[in-house]
Amino acid sequence: MTGATGVDGRPRHLLSIEELGADGLRTLLQLSDTFVEVGQREIPKVPALRGRTVVSLFFEDSTRTRISFETAAKRLSADVMGFSAGSSSLKKGESLRDTVETILAMGVDALVVRHRSSGAPLQVARWCDEISDGRTVSVLNGGDGWHQHPTQALLDAYSLLERLGRRPGDVPSREGVSSASVGDSRHSRVARSNIEAFTLLGADVTLVAPPTLLPAAMPGWPVSVSHDLDEVLAKTDVVYLLRLQRERMEGGLLPSIREYTATYGLTIERTRRLRDDAIVMHPGPMNRGVEIADDATRLLGSLVTDQVRNGVATRMAALFWLLGGSIDG
């Protein structure tokens, strides 16, 4: 995490799954187990981060990630500050660095950064290390461009292990789990983070997409590639459907949305090809009727709701891990 350490020698930032590594992944999944239990209490709150301040620094629209992080921070008893780029001094010409310096001057402890540009959270982390006057300020990547979304991968990994009946400390999971990442991996930060997390869990990952929606270059990626969803469905354990990110696409990548759905969408007809114990995942928000049929979200093997629920616990784990404190106060 940019080589910096914070509380008790712990990493100062959470920017990517690659930097997290297998040991960090195992630690966070085990902590997530603890915070899932906290969420089941009558009062789902602990004083672990009382007196700490967490800022949601979002330069890109989000619903799930922002609410999940803010709920996680509040359940840890941290103070939460929200930032909206649309109503900030950025519209008056203030630079990103100026914004970061202003927020750091308020004595905050963590920034959750979401930005449309790849690498923005890394740059913010470098500024925090440079100008925080010795104060430990952590940066968590809430999604940057086409690059990374590490906490989405954490909640996905936890949800998958939970469904497989594995404990987080059992990483890697059972040998031979196969995962098909279906759709727009070219523009997907979720796909990149999940490939890293799932392979650390011991899964075999196949990217399923038309050539135009695959990354331009995949040197060293530990994945297989297929253009035939029907052929892959019958032999995969986990079908991870990626959102078709039309807001990031250039023209001409797809003949039509209708054709994409006919070839790569999880239609009701295609659900009949799934194995009886197959698991279906989607990061949200869903383009219903495009990458997934509405009825397919209600399959017995669907983890869509579990993913949202576990997002709070895994983000509690990430904040606690970086900022320290005691679960019991």
Image (cartoon, rainbow, N blue to C red):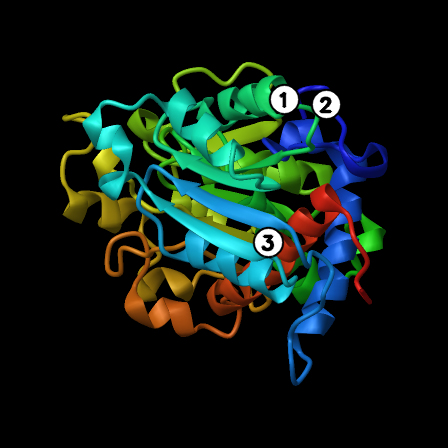
Residue at image position (34%, 37%) is 59
Q: CA distance from mark 2 to mark 1?
A: 8 Å
Measured as percent of width and height from the top left, residue 167 is found at: 80, 60
Identify whether 118 is placed above or below 288.
Answer: above
Q: Earlier in the sequence, mark 3 or mark 2?
A: 2
Residue 155 placement (x, y as % from top left):
59, 54
Residue 197 visible in the snapshot:
yes
Mark sitting on residue 129? 1
Using the rendered image of the protein, determine whether residue 234 is visible from the camera's viewpoint.
no
Whether residues under marks 1 and 3 lie with C-beta atoms below 8 angstroms apart, the answer is no
Q: Report, in whole angstroms, how far the alpha carbon at label 3 lies from the one at label 2.
A: 24 Å
Q: CA distance from mark 1 to mark 3?
A: 27 Å
Dot 2 and dot 1 residues touching (CB under 8 Å): yes
The amino acid beneath tag 1 is: Asp
166 left or right, relative to 180? right
Q: Which residue is mark 2?
A: 4
Nearest the camera: 115 or 17? 115
Residue 299 higher or lower than 42, as above or below: above
Q: Give the amino acid at mark 2.
A: Ala
**2 or 1: tag closer to the N-terminus:** 2
Label 1's element?
Answer: helix
